[in-house]
Image (cartoon, rainbow, N blue to C red):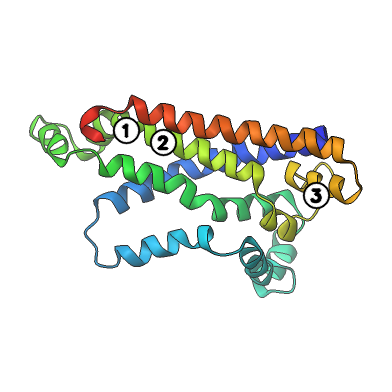
Amino acid sequence: MDWQAARVSLLLAALTAVLLLPPGIALARWLALTRWRGKPLAEALLMLPLLLPPTVIGFYFLLALGQASPLGAWLASNLDLRLVFSFQGLLLASLLVNLPFMVQPIQRAFAAIPHSLREAAWVSGLGAWRTFLKIELPLAWPGLLAGVALTAAHTLGEFGVVLMVGGSIPGETRTLSIAIYDRVQAFDTASAHAMALALVFCSVLAVALVFAADRKRPLQER
């Protein structure tokens, strides 16, 4: 087991889930309630990370934020921030790739809340913000749990974007998925097997949490 890679993977998964949760909730609720005509286009754009090959996303990330790009050069010269082959860049790419995994379960949870409950809360004197905190969030918690679990699990297993944006720098950008690839290349199948089993366990645990949360939803939301 490559414990350095495990630490990087766990840190990346935790930060991705934590940082994506607030904007994920806001975007998911807006998509669940909006009647904007452009909603199908917004949902299609949200789906792109699920449909495009990870190498495509990594390639455009490099074009947009590499030091050869105007923005990348400006960040490097003015802020001393290099987003290619660094943990910061890996985290940013992870946020972009995992957005649909966070948003979609939460969107379904908000969409399942009857609008009559919001209206009843408003009639009872609760404002929009207090209705969101006291009514909507408690009812949508299974979606939030599912979003966090799926985001963390997918981050742990991501390979293509990680390899293109972060490379394989020990202790900084080498994740478990990259370490498995390196061990297979070196014909160290025992180490690769141990790390692969760890990722399989994390994925099974995430899916189990999703289904367990779904069973906790009230029957009227299903």
Residue found at x 37% / y 47%: 26
Up/down of 126 relative to 174, above or below: above
- Of mark 2 and mark 1, the one earlier in the sequence is 1
Residue 100 to residue 39: above or below: above
Q: Of callouts 1 and 3, which one flags the residue occurring earlier in the amino acid sequence?
A: 1
What is the distance, in whole Å, between disc 1 and disc 3 at their CAs? 40 Å
Q: Report the quarter where the N terminus lies.
A: top right
> Is residue 18 left or right of 160 when viewed as pictured?
left
Q: Nearer the viewer, residue 125 or 52?
A: 52
Which residue sits furthest left?
Answer: 123
Residue 38's quadrant in the figure? bottom left
How far from the left and from the top, in percent, is residue 96? 55, 55
Element at label 1: helix
- Amino acid on which the number 2 mark rests in the picture: Leu
Give the vertical position of 63 relative to 87 (above or below): below
Mark 1 and mark 3 residues within 8 Å of each other at the beta carbon: no
Mark 3 residue crowding within 10 angstroms, few (<14) / some (14–19) / many (20+): some
Residue 181 tag number: 3
Dot 2 lies on which element? helix
Which quadrant holds residue 11?
A: top right
Q: Amino acid at mark 1?
A: Leu
Residue linked to disc 2: 144
Answer above or below: position of 126 versus 46: above
Label 1: which residue?
137
Question: Do the residues under discs 2 and 1 have CB atoms within 8 angstroms?
Answer: yes
Q: Which circle, 1 or 3, is nearer the viewer?
A: 3
Q: Residue at x 62, y 55 (%)?
A: 93
Residue 41: horizontal and vertical position, in percent? 35, 67
Q: Position of residue 137 (x, y in %)?
A: 32, 33
